Amino acid sequence: MNALDIDLIRKSATGTASRDRSTAHSLDRMTALQVARRTVIFTVDAAGIASLMDAAREDIPGLTSNRIVQAVANHNPDTFWAIARRDHFEIDRPKGEGFFAVLPLTHEGMRGLIDGSLDTRNPDLSFIARQSERPAGIYIWAIHAKGTLAAAIPLVLQKISAPLYRGVNLYSRPVTKEGLRVLEPLGFCPGARYDGLFAPNLQMFDRSKDVAAIKFVRQDSVSVRVVRSMDEMARVIAIRGAVYMAEQHCPFEEEFDGNDFSATHLICHKGREPVGCLRIRYFADFAKLERLAVRNESRHEGLAGQIVDAAIELCRKKGYRILYAHSQTRLLKFWEQHGFARMTGARDFAFSDFDYTEVMLETEKHPQSINLGADPYVIIRPEGLWDTPGVLEMSASRGASLCAEAG
């Protein structure tokens, strides 16, 4: 089904945010995560699916029939999730306002998706995995989530990040160039592969590295590390979407400002759950810390401080002595607790409906900071893992290849 219209979601969410933003909705006044407090996701019966599909046809042309979607949901209830605003939700009469639909495909279904033989408008049920069956791939079938309902999409994505689905790649077919541009920062890349097949017209979100990374993690353990995969980047985007877009009503284009692919990102996990993030950008003689976000339910546990401390350490190892940040004026004390101070002659300014001031930390380079005299193998190691031998230096054991010059 060619019905992924993220452009609609993005425009609707931005339009609502511009109408409803208020500085009264600050982080410290929130008592629960906005995305969870204001929205709910749930399964619905056949009548509920029909009602949501009929409403979606006004915005998304080409949707398949209600009967087909109902048959797929009857085969596997985890394929269709209704979305509603919490203040409109009644548990005895659940009624959705939007939806998110997927096709969890079997091996044969995935081969059909990639080679084009799978009819996504009328999929054969034998190609769709059962509720308790691990799929070979998950196809984003259709999304209809207008206005603030778009903030619930990360909640649905969490459903397909459960152990049964961990490491299973996601696939999509965007219908507009704008939809394509929105998909890419979420972790989708042009071209999809499966079992030796390739489809250039599909988008793919590679989550295969999740399987190799699975290990026992204490539920209360906290880790902060550099983002190294598109899956981790998608988690960062979900956190920032929940904190800045849902809680602070920041428009999409202001939050995702074009700098995410020219920066280092840190992600904080509590156990296996992603709870916080921060972005670092580098300039000639200073590094800038920004986009610090911690999910509401994990605040007041010192996680923001641990993320900032990890960022400071990383920057010191890269040789930076000056760290710079824009602090919301109400959070100045937090930055001061981590060594920052309001700059001499600091400029006060505002963006995205909050007041900011300039803060700076002057520190010393790390004793083992990276410089031109460092071992070449150290310099090419993964960001932040300069103390651990990397895959490229291990390749040195093969020696150099000799190539004959053509002609």
Image (spheres, rainbow, N blue to C red):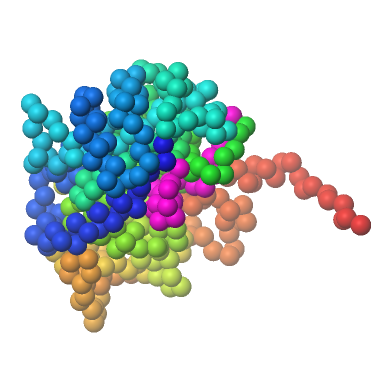
Front in this rendered view, residue 303 or 290: 290
Front in this rendered view, residue 286 or 281: 281
The spot of residue 78 in percent (x, y) is 31, 26
The spot of residue 105 in percent (x, y) is 45, 26
Horizontal relation, residue 93 to residue 142: left or right: left
The spot of residue 359 in percent (x, y) is 26, 70
Horizontal relation, residue 170 to residue 403: left or right: left
Quarter-wise, where is residue 282 in the image?
bottom left
Is 183 inside the magenta-drawn segment? yes
Vertical side of 172 occupied by 376: above or below: below
Identified at 20% across, 27% down, the residue is 47
Identified at 49% across, 25% down, the residue is 109
Vertical side of 92 occupied by 264: above or below: below
Check the image and name the residue furthest to the right.
407
Q: Is residue 272 visible?
A: no
Identified at 48% across, 30% down, the residue is 119
Front in this rendered view, residue 212 or 136: 136
In the picture, which quadrant includes the N terminus?
top left
Identified at 28% across, 56% down, the residue is 11
Which stretch did the figure color magenta? Answer: 173-195
In the picture, which quadrant includes the C terminus?
bottom right
The spot of residue 16 in percent (x, y) is 19, 56
Quarter-wise, where is residue 372 in the image?
bottom right
